[in-house]
Amino acid sequence: MKYAKKFGYHLIDGKYYEETSVGGIPTFKKVSEKEIDKLDMLADKIAEKLKDNLDTKMVLKESVMALFKKDINKLHKMLFKSKRKYKAETREHHCVDMKIGNFVLVIVV
């Protein structure tokens, strides 16, 4: 059985499921591939429309401020004091994060 979480849905063996709760008991409702594709297209359009109004510096600063003090210091040393050049890479899976060397900065949970 292959499991992942994608777009806020559970992806089990290639099929999408939405988690709901009935009387405090979690239940899973199957979501069609067509519905997921439609939501993906709408999210893409919304993101494209809003991206010019996004203050990326503020978003990244909030993400960094959510770290523990020692992690902020570690990331600062990696980026500014190390002789090694680190390249940040945006990753997408169950959350959006940025990988800098072996350090992972969570942006969206």
Image (cartoon, rainbow, N blue to C red):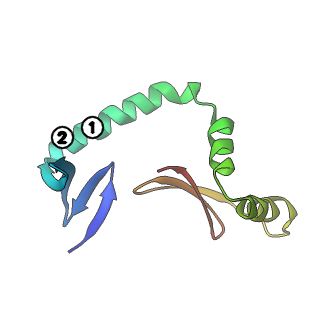
| Residue drawn at 32 percent across, 58 percent down | 5
| Residue drawn at 75 percent across, 64 percent down | 70
On the image, which quarter does residue 103 sit in? bottom right
| Residue drawn at 16 percent across, 43 percent down | 34
Q: Residue 52, percent across and down?
A: 57, 26
Q: Label 1: how many residues lie within 10 Å, few (<14), some (14-19) or many (20+)?
A: few
Say how many tags the image has: 2
Mark 1 near mark 2, Cβ–Cβ under 8 Å?
yes
Q: Nearer the viewer, residue 4 or 46?
A: 4
On the image, which quarter does residue 68 sit in? bottom right
- According to the picture, the residue beneath numbered tag 1 turns out to be 39
The numbered dot on residue 35 is 2
Q: Nearer the viewer, residue 8 or 66?
A: 66
Q: Please, is residue 6 above or below residue 78 in the view?
A: above
| Residue drawn at 27 percent across, 37 percent down | 39
Q: Label 2: how many residues lie within 10 Å, few (<14), some (14-19) or many (20+)?
A: few
Q: Residue 77, percent across and down?
A: 82, 64
Q: Please, is residue 50 above or below residue 77 in the view?
A: above
Give the Cα distance between marks 1 and 2: 6 Å
On screen, residue 65 versus residue 12, left or right, reads right
Q: Residue 72, percent across and down?
A: 74, 58
Toward the front, the furthest residue is 23
- Identify the image quadrant of the N terminus: bottom left
Q: Please, is residue 54 above or below residue 10 in the view?
A: above
Callout 1 amino acid: Leu
Q: Secondary structure at mark 2?
A: helix
On screen, residue 47 versus residue 87, left or right, reads left
Q: Nearer the viewer, residue 75 or 46?
A: 75
